[in-house]
Image: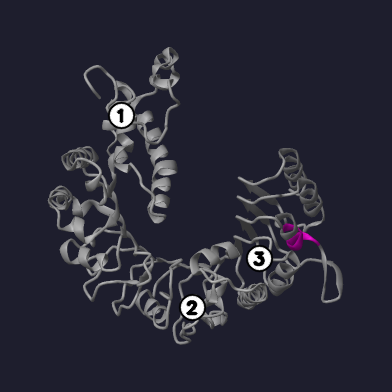
């Protein structure tokens, strides 16, 4: 803050409406009376709930951010805010560095700002986000200065996210400045989106990460023989090209034998995984409790997962569909309508075959669009789970048939000749998250005739009128 009390930091995040800070009422606002410790907790909540999620999402999509300025915006509001921010080290423990910014912003300004952030973070565990790492930046004086600032903090590193501009930049970075540390628990590596896949470095890659628990790889080909027994959460893709190719699945299975949560996604075009080998029958995911997967992988790379002996601990499955427009934008090919319909039918059949023998408790269906017919969802998925005891059903990011999907799950049917039965007879809760076109009146009728085990319907950021939603909750409350 300048001597005059005016901020020298622009409000890039639009945290405050224009004129708010000059409004005379602001000086008497109740928030100015909060204790410094309470303000610090509010700032941390803002960072975790909004800023960090927004920044992570933007980096994955290649968007420009002003991440280094964010905590300074809060500190520049007034002296009370500045005191609260500077007395909250964890607020500064999220460090963002854009490797392309050296060409847009004064490098001394960047280094001074980074040094100030590290000082204010103190001994806090650090999350570092490096965007667009490239070989040109790695040769610059700016990088050497940044390295001198961050290297003394390496034992504080807890999480690292790094994106790379070109396929060769990951190996170049690891040769000059490996991002692996003994204290690192999470690492997210986003490879270049060029046609050539980014490959991970050799045998010493991540060798120092003795505390590694979570790893995320996008647009990276995992061809590696090292074993990481401490990793419990593995996230792969969605990736462009044929990165999940003939050997990647096998190498993943060998490298991560102890995973509890597996997220394995691909763009919904069978051409991208046409050369993938089936899931190795000799490999057992004995500890796996949660699986997120694309249908196309269930019928290509993961053929064989439906054998019960491989998944003794699995409790939750999330299936990520995607619409045809997304496929076209990735692949660029104009498949005819018949082949696309055939692909969707094969996807649903693969999902049904997979779920048929799994006694899971939670199923999440994400990204269903207008071209997935509700009748097909009922016949291929819900009917396949007739003998299972599913308890929790989620619909997320569904579009035009959302109400019909709910009906397919809740309406009574004839099962084994018995009228008034249900495919999902043990269902306890239904969750709608970011779903469109939910007919409130029909929703009420489906809940009324649904299985008696149903106790809860949760709606988040979805198109349903409030009156109908309240009526649904009132109906369920009478069931005890």
Depth check, front residue: 480 or 368 = 368
Locate residue 63 relative to residue 339 in the image: left or right: left
Callout 2 crowding tier (Cα within 10 Å): few <14, some 14–19, many ≥20 = many
Marks 1 and 3, the one that precedes in the sequence: 1
Task: Give the Cα distance between marks 1 and 3.
Answer: 49 Å
Which residues fall within the magenta stretch? 406-411
Please name which of the two marks, 2 or 3, marks the residue nearer to the observer.
2
Inspect this view and state whether residue 181 appears.
no
Residue named by callout 2: 273
Task: Give the position of the N terminus as an image quadrant.
Answer: top left
Residue sitting at x 42%, y 33%? 14
Marks 2 and 1, the one that precedes in the sequence: 1
Depth check, front residue: 217 or 28 = 217
Furthest-top residue in view? 24
Residue 73 quadrant: top left
Q: Residue 75 got which mark?
A: 1
Residue 219 x/y as whole percent? 38, 67
Marks 2 and 3, the one that precedes in the sequence: 2
Residue 147 x/y as whole percent? 15, 52
Q: Let me know if residue 38 is in the magenta part.
A: no
Magenta region, main secondary structure: helix
Residue 103 x/y as whole percent? 23, 47
Q: Residue 390 got which mark?
A: 3
Contact check, label 1 and label 3, Cβ < 8 Å: no
């Amino acid at each position: 803050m300048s001597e005059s009390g005016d901020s020298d930091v622009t409000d890039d995040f639009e945290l405050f409406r224009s004129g708010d800070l000059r409004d005379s009422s602001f000086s008497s606002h109740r928030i100015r009376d909060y204790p410094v410790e309470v303000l610090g907790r509010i700032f941390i909540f803002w960072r975790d709930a909004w800023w960090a999620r927004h920044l992570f999402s933007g980096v994955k999509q290649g968007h420009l951010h002003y991440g280094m300025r964010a905590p300074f915006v809060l500190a520049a509001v007034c002296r009370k805010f500045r005191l609260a921010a500077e007395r909250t080290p964890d607020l500064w423990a999220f460090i963002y560095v854009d490797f392309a910014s050296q060409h847009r912003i004064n490098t001394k300004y960047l280094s001074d700002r980074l040094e100030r952030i590290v000082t204010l973070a103190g001994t806090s565990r650090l999350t570092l986000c490096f965007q667009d790492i490239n070989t040109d930046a790695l040769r610059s004086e700016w990088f050497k200065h940044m390295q001198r600032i961050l290297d003394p903090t390496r034992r504080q590193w807890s999480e690292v996210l790094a994106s790379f501009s070109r396929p060769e930049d990951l190996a170049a970075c690891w040769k000059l400045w490996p991002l692996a540390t003994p204290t690192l628990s999470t690492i997210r590596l986003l490879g270049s989106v060029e046609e050539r896949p980014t490959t991970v470095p050799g045998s010493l890659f991540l060798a120092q990460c003795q505390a590694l628990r979570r790893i995320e790889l996008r647009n990276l080909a995992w061809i590696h023989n090292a074993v990481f027994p401490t990793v419990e959460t593995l996230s792969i893709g969605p990736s462009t090209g044929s990165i999940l190719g003939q050997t990647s699945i096998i190498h993943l299975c060998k490298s991560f034998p102890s995973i509890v949560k597996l997220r394995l996604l691909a763009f919904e075009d069978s051409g991208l995984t046409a050369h993938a080998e089936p899931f190795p029958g000799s490999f057992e995911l004995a500890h796996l409790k949660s699986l997120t997967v694309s249908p196309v992988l269930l019928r290509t790379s993961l053929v064989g997962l439906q054998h019960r002996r491989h998944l003794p601990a699995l409790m939750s499955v999330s299936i990520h569909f995607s619409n045809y427009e997304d496929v076209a934008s990735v692949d660029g090919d104009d498949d005819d309508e018949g082949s696309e319909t055939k692909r969707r039918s094969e996807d649903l059949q693969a999902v049904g075959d997979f779920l048929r023998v799994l006694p899971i408790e939670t199923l999440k269906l994400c990204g269903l669009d207008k071209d997935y017919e509700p009748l097909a969802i009922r016949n291929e998925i819900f009917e396949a789970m007739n003998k299972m005891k599913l308890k929790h059903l989620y619909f997320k990011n569904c579009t035009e048939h959302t109400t019909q999907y709910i009906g397919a799950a809740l309406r009574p049917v004839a099962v084994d000749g018995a009228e008034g039965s249900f495919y999902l007879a043990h269902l306890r809760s239904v969750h709608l998250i970011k779903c469109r076109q939910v007919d409130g009146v029909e929703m009420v009728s489906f809940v009324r005739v649904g299985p008696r085990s149903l106790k809860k319907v949760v709606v988040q950021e979805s198109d349903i009128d409030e009156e109908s939603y309240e009526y649904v909750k009132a109906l369920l409350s009478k069931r005890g």
